Image (cartoon, grey):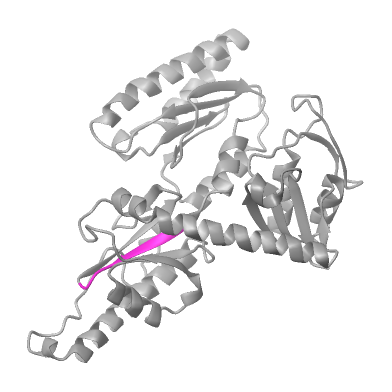
Amino acid sequence: MSQNLTLKSIRNTLDSLRKVKAQPALSAFVSTHRTHPDNKRDPIALKNALSEAQTRIENEYDRHTAQAIMEKIDTALEGWDHNYNLDTLAIFATDSDAKVLRLPLDASERVVVDERFSTRDLVRELSHAIHYYAVVITRESARLIEAVNGRVVREFDADTPEQNTPKMLNTPFPIKNTLHSSSADRTAASNEDNHLKEFFNRVDKSVQELRARAGEDNIPLFVIGDSRNISFYQEVCDRPEIIVGSADKVTQLEDGCALHIIQSIQDEVEAYRGRQQQAAKEGISQARSQNRLLVDLQDIYRSAYQGAGDTLYVRMGYMQPARVDETQQTLVAVEDASGEGVNDDVVGDIIDLVKNNGGQVVFLPSDIIGEQQDIALSTRF
């Protein structure tokens, strides 16, 4: 089934695809475009990728297998509208199913025919990206945008599923301010301030409801507007601790495209990333001083398996093939990821174990985690 997904849904879908094994499993990645007229080239790029995929499968397997897989892809792409493309179109297909995803990130154009889907690079890139909401407020209206790094995932509107199924308890985005003071009332600044605060409080309740509906209760929030409105929003926000940054010099708040707004706050996003990394560095130091820091991959795997992991620190880009024995809770690192019985990236499994047991995962550049350190785990005790 072809679809636009939330970032959480994309991660979950990629995680599930990572476990699929088939003969063959086809992965195809096509660079696409968000806007006209560039997206007019996307159908041709897609057609070329599918032609290459069919030829590869016919050569490596047989025509019957290729036909079965291509039929599944054709069904998944039925009614596809390239006007809604993001940055990459990812196709994952076997002879029994096909999924087509729009992704808010760049992926190398390629066709991969293997026993498993080619997902780990995508999973890793999404895992260490900054994923956030940006609420855009003016005296007249409010917008809500979901983004990852400098890319827009979506802007909430009348067609956003979370706002419709079931119907929201609070006002769906975009929100118009219907609480204006009359012209005479506006002579009293305090009265207008109260009206604005009431409006922003309503906006915030919608933000909180949507975060909960999307299953993203911990997603950070950036507030965008003029300094006065930002201050009012922070004052009435039900959960001010989720606000990790603000920007008061962004233009075209009401009618500017979402991408313009998101690209205008990247200094604030990078500042937030820097604070996260500094906090992680301090967390590593503290765990080491309290003898709660594990750095051996075997020890980390066993502790994560047993649910003792508090925070996992991973160097960006670090992957490790290994043979794993879950019964003994042991692993042996290997060089060849394609070997028989080899888990092509045991780090991904450790990440899943830590998250599933309530721990956190932080991805760090080498200058933060340490030049000689690929992975570390602080334990709860």
In percent of width and height, residue 163 lies at 36, 62
Work out which quarter of the rendered image holds the N terminus and state it. top left
Q: Can you say whether 115 is above or below 18 in the image?
A: above
- Identity of the residue drawn at 37% across and 56% down: 265
Question: For this view, does 203 lie left or right of residue 184?
Answer: right
Residue 358: in sight, yes or no? Answer: no
Q: Which residues are magenta?
A: 132-139
Q: Can you say whether 251 is above or below 102 in the image?
A: below
Q: Can you say whether 107 is above or below 202 in the image?
A: above
Work out which quarter of the rendered image holds the C terminus and state it. bottom right
Question: For this view, does 70 lie left or right of residue 82?
Answer: right
Residue in front for this viewpoint, 327 or 333: 333
- Identity of the residue drawn at 49% across and 30% down: 91
In percent of width and height, residue 12 lies at 57, 48
- Identity of the residue drawn at 79% across and 31% down: 342
Q: Can you say whether 269 is above or below 223 in the image?
A: above
In percent of width and height, residue 297 lies at 82, 45
Q: How many marks?
A: 0
Residue extending furthest toward the top: 59
Q: Which quadrant would residue 46 be assigned to in this image? A: top left
Question: For this view, does 247 lie left or right of residue 183?
Answer: right
Question: For this view, does 328 lie left or right of residue 185?
Answer: right
Residue in front for this viewpoint, 167 or 40: 40
The stretch drawn in magenta includes residue 149: no
In percent of width and height, residue 273 lies at 53, 56
Residue extending furthest toward the right: 328
The stretch drawn in magenta includes residue 137: yes
